[in-house]
Amino acid sequence: MTSLEELKDGDRVRVQGGRNFEKFHGGMEGTIITNNVENKNMNIQWDDVATAGPEPMSVAYRNLEYAPNRGGYRAGHAASAAATASQPGAKAPEAPKGPLVDTNGDYSTRQLVQLHSLQGAAELNGKLGRLRKFDVNAGRWEVDVREQGIKRLKEDCLGKPPKPEVPEGLGVEELKSRGNDCFKKVELEEAIAFYSAAIDLIEDDEADQKPPAECLEPKYVSVLHGNRAQVYISLCREVHGEDRCVSKEARMFAMRANMDSAKSMELDETNGKAYYRRGCAVLGMAPSASRAKEAIWNLEIALSGRASGGQETDLLEGVSVVLPNAMRHEVANLLEYAKRRLDACTEAAVPDVEAFQNCKQQ
């Protein structure tokens, strides 16, 4: 089966069944403009211009499937019949056979699980995913497996993920580097563990060996808090899925991202990524007009930035915000989303922050 990483510019892709968002939905097909393998997303020109608009859109791999043949969509289908037959332990989504429920035994929707004991899809063993719905008649959970999409699995193949472990004796720089590597591999819990260990080392006044002086600089610590905020934002989006209501766990991750972003801004007022991330975090909390306005304020500050330092703005007197030029389009898109949230003032889906590929870990 052709993987998304192998696809070239001009190849065709389709949104997986059940992936429904404001600008794209299950079954929509389009042409790849750019395949960003490192960031696990693609810029796609959709055929359905009325829904997606005329401009190419960045979409995460987890929402997509290869579409060599036009019009091959079937609701709930995410892989070819041949691929499904070769992976009996990890069935691709198909039309539900019975009622779909949120709980079954010790498992419940949004729960994080680790896959194991798969015979025909051994490459998925050890991977993490979120439970979505349990098909009562089929006796299988729909599992949103990280970087793999929806799989239908029996409970015998699911287990509790291990707690992340951080090796002893690592310095701040090594911990930060390992956190970045884990984030790139979508090992989100491990990334948080490494970033947290680095921050704890910096804040430990009684440590026998002090971190290097450059690691104690406010701008360096600001980056650490910003990187951890981005992981919490990714977890918020992952937990939320396609639910219309923001769950308690999603809000918790959003609040943690908000606190880390606020700390990042406090340590370095010129850090444009921190304002962008705080805008993302605020939009992930319980919707309200005040939060939408707060998100707009932060995103407008981020958008005032330039790669070499922006001009002073009325929003932050005496501060020149720094924002990579590659991020300007992404921030502008999220700003427009925040304004629509303010206009609607209703509960809406958390913005798909994984679509914003240029806000990279530092």
Image (spheres, rainbow, N blue to C red):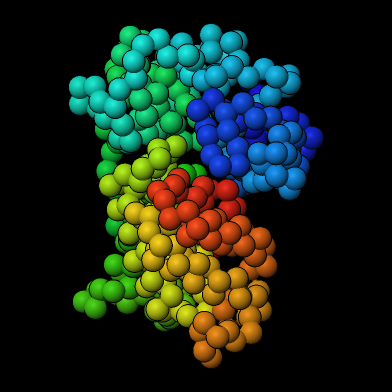
Can residue 166 be seen from the camera position used here? Answer: no
The x, y position of residue 133, in whole percent, is 35, 25
Residue 224 image-quadrant placement: bottom left
Query: In the rendered image, which quarter contains the N terminus?
Result: top right
In-front residue for pair 114/326: 326
Along the horizontal axis of the image, is 9 left or right of 63? right
The x, y position of residue 287, in whole percent, is 38, 55
Residue at image point 62% right, 62% down: 332
In-front residue for pair 2/350: 350
Q: Does residue 239 sit above or below 299 in this rendering?
A: above
In-front residue for pair 202/41: 41
What is the tally of numbered marks visible in this picture? 0
Residue at image point 30% right, 19% down: 155
The x, y position of residue 125, in whole percent, is 41, 26
Farthest bottom residue? Answer: 318
Residue at image point 25% right, 25% down: 103
Q: Does residue 304 sit above or below 200 in this rendering?
A: below
Farthest right residue? Answer: 10
Q: Does residue 137 sit above or below 188 in this rendering?
A: above
The x, y position of residue 278, in whole percent, is 44, 65
Residue at image point 73% right, 29% down: 12
In-front residue for pair 15/157: 15
Q: Does residue 68 sit above or below 214 in this rendering?
A: above
Can residue 186 be seen from the camera position used here? Answer: yes
